Image (tube, grey):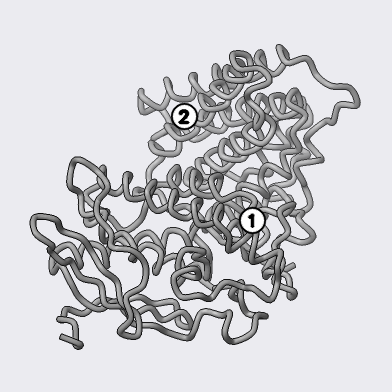
Amino acid sequence: MDARTSPPSNDRFDPSKTPEHFVILPPEIRDGRMSISTYQQIAKTTDKLPDEGLELTVLGLFGEVGSLLSAFKKRQRDRAAFKRYNATILEELGDTLWYFSTLATRAKIDLSTIAQLAFRKLADWSSVKPADPTLGFADVQSRHDQPVPEESFSAQVLALAGCVGDLLNDFKTGIFDHNRDKLSAHMVEIFRALVAAADSADVDMGAAALENLKKTFSRWPAETTYPPRFDAGMPKNERLPPWLEFYIAEETAGEKKYVIQKCNKIIIGDRLTDNKMERDDYRFHDVFHLAFAVHLGWSPVLRALLHLKRKCDPELDENQDGARAILIEEGVATFIFGRGLECELFEKVDHVDYDLLKSIQDFVRGYEVAWCALWQWEKAIMDGFSIFRQLVDKRKGYVMADFENHTISFREGNDEDE
């Protein structure tokens, strides 16, 4: 099944759905189901780790198990305040499974074989089917009819951590370089412990694997296909046009510096300053709103500035283009700008970290932009900072926003009206 989906035709956002509904998954995943072998094959295509050895996968596996323990600790510490416990456990188990699968792939070990060996007695090992294409996660996982006590999950994750710790200790000695069977033995024990942890948390490993792939393809898709714009069904005078050119420049009044923005030779918005004791050029931050509109098809701020709010639909006008949505967008812009200051305005990197993207998605939950994939946010952030850096350098110039082709560019120049 091609998991390609798009915003509803009537342009209404359904808050019960999540951004993962707009991720294009490989056709091997049918009705949200896949075999263990299929998962390993797909996970292999998503391996973006910088080297081909085992070290990063072993360390990643160890780190994800630590995250599982951290989530349980938060549940014990914060109790009712930690509302996202179940979702966090599902995500962390999925991440753990990805590192486990990637370790197996890099070591040229078949994951379905490991899964079979984990629950067979020694006498039955000869009946294992190599690369069994039919074996699913449900086939190796028991399901509990009654809730499992929380302390059971704690014990199982500690056991899992112990197994991974043993793997790490042997890895440090270099024993796996000449003994793949030793690595396989560790992986059988780890898989058995991973299934026990999932059972004790009442987590479907197949669901955890699927959600992990949705997250991965949301960040690194096989193809970058933009979904239809949110205003596609709106009247022409309430849609963003195919393209717009903006003139953004720093002006001086006495000792005070501020930024103006023009569109179609008309000043739009207020004069902007940094609004901070320490000067950081935030006055040029409107470029982020333009980048949001280009790559996400979303910017309540820009709609308000250009008088393009979707008035024909009172619900969209109030809830998606209204004051609270504007504050949400300004908050996102401020948040990513703060992160950019810590990272040299993302000048020397080609991507942003996942934690930033995940925090943004959590921040916009409940708004239509929550439909957008992680790669769209990353493009918006990277392009926004690229234009921002050029504006900071030149202090004025033209920004071309192509909403149809999803590009944004800068050219140096003075105000042609002057």
Element on which disc 1 rests: helix
Residue appearing at x 70%, y 47% in the figure: 36
Q: Give the quadrant of residue 283.
A: bottom left
Q: In 3D space, how far apart are the residues under numbered discs 1 and 2 (Cα atoms)?
A: 24 Å
Quadrant (top left, top right, bottom left, bottom right) of the C terminus = bottom left
Quarter of the image with the N terminus in it: bottom right
Give the residue number, with chain letter if any, for mark 1: 20
Q: Earlier in the sequence, mark 1 or mark 2?
A: 1
- In this rendering, the answer to whether 64 lies above or below 271 is above
Q: In this view, does 114 lie to the left or right of 148?
A: left
- Locate residue 333 relative to residue 23 in the image: left or right: left
Q: In which quarter of the image is residue 309?
A: bottom right
Residue bearing mark 2: 63
**Residue 25 seen anywhere in this rendered image of the structure:** no
User: Does residue 149 lie above or below 311 as drawn?
Assistant: above
Residue found at the far front of this picture: 254
**x then y, percent, for residue 278:** 18, 41
Residue at the (57%, 35%) spot, across then down: 96
Question: Which numbered disc covers residue 198?
Answer: none
Residue located at (67% from left, 53% from top): 18
Which kind of residue does numbered mark 1 sit on? Glu
Image position, residue 316 (x, y; %): 67, 65
**Residue 212 location, x and y as percent?**
61, 47
